[in-house]
Image: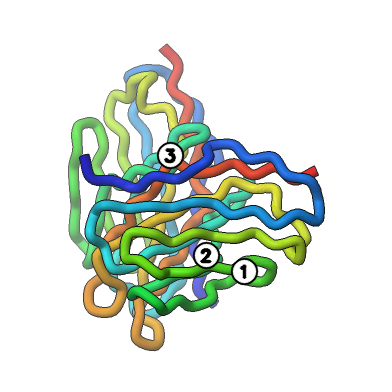
Amino acid sequence: DGGITQSPKYLFRKEGQNVTLSCEQNLNHDAMYWYRQDPGQGLRLIYYSQIVNDFQKGDIAEGYSVSREKKESFPLTVTSAQKNPTAFYLCASSPDTGHFPYEQYFGPGTRLTVT
Amino acid sequence: EDQVTQSPEALRLQEGESSSLNCSYTVSGLRGLFWYRQDPGKGPEFLFTLYSAGEEKEKERLKATLTKKESFLHITAPKPEDSATYLCAVQALRVGRFKTIFGAGTRLFVKA
């Protein structure tokens, strides 16, 4: 079955610790995205990548970092510089972002709690 | 400023009571509008894409329509399993890529 996997489903960390969220897709999609979802708000874009070894900041990139070394993988690191990291994190992918408005396909999400 | 507003924030229906969810947008250069369904604690699931005003798409009890300013998701004779949050998103072309703007969603509760 093709799809997107995220791990872990739940993650608990202490303040001051960096944490990395995993995202893998086997849909052969070029573009991958990281969103943050908070209650009562729309999904907000953290980072996106249109191609391997390239990624761009989204609307709320401060305190986050990513890498795209393989087409299938787009891990997100939440650093200690992120002031309010507790949220539901969603990874998504789509065939392309530059030539046609494709829909995005989402993973199951990771709920991060920082205390 | 690009904006997507969904209304109502929450909607409670009895089973079989048809209704509509609204997604209004102020986005220049719209290229596509998407509807997703999201169950609690899960990722959004893609439902429909609409590309131009006047277009309609249907799937089971759901029908999505698009005008130049808004989209509606009509739910006919809903069942309890239709309870979920419905998200609307628009895409516009911005500096060589498609930017996606999501609305905050409408939480739908269908009571048996």
- For disc 1, the chain is A
Are tags 2 and 3 found on a single chain?
A: no
Q: Position of residue A32 (x, y in %)?
A: 38, 64
Give the Cα separation between the discs numbered 2 and 3.
17 Å
Q: What kind of element bears circle 1? A: loop
- Above or below, A28 against A89 in this view is below
Q: Are marks 1 and 2 in contact (CB under 8 Å)?
A: yes
Q: Amino acid at mark 3?
A: Gln
- Above or below, B65 against B10 in this view is below
Give the Cα separation between the discs numbered 1 and 2.
6 Å
Q: How many marks?
A: 3
Label of residue A60 in the image: 1
Q: Amino acid at mark 2?
A: Leu
Label of residue B38 in the image: 3
A9 horizontally vs B100: left or right:
right
Q: Tell me what residue is drawn at x 34 percent, y 86 percent.
A: B96
Q: Position of residue A110 (x, y in %)?
A: 54, 43
Q: Position of residue A68 (x, y in %)?
A: 42, 69
Q: Are marks 3 and 1 in contact (CB under 8 Å)?
A: no
Q: Tell me what residue is drawn at x 69 percent, y 67 percent.
A: A63
- Above or below, B13 against B29 in this view is above
The front one of A5 and B18 is: A5
> Does residue A38 appear in this view?
yes
CA neighbours of label 2 inside 10 A, class few (<14), some (14 to 19), many (20+): many
- For disc 3, the chain is B
Q: Amino acid at mark 1?
A: Ile
Name of the residue lying farthest toward the top: B112
Q: Which residue is mark 2?
A: A45
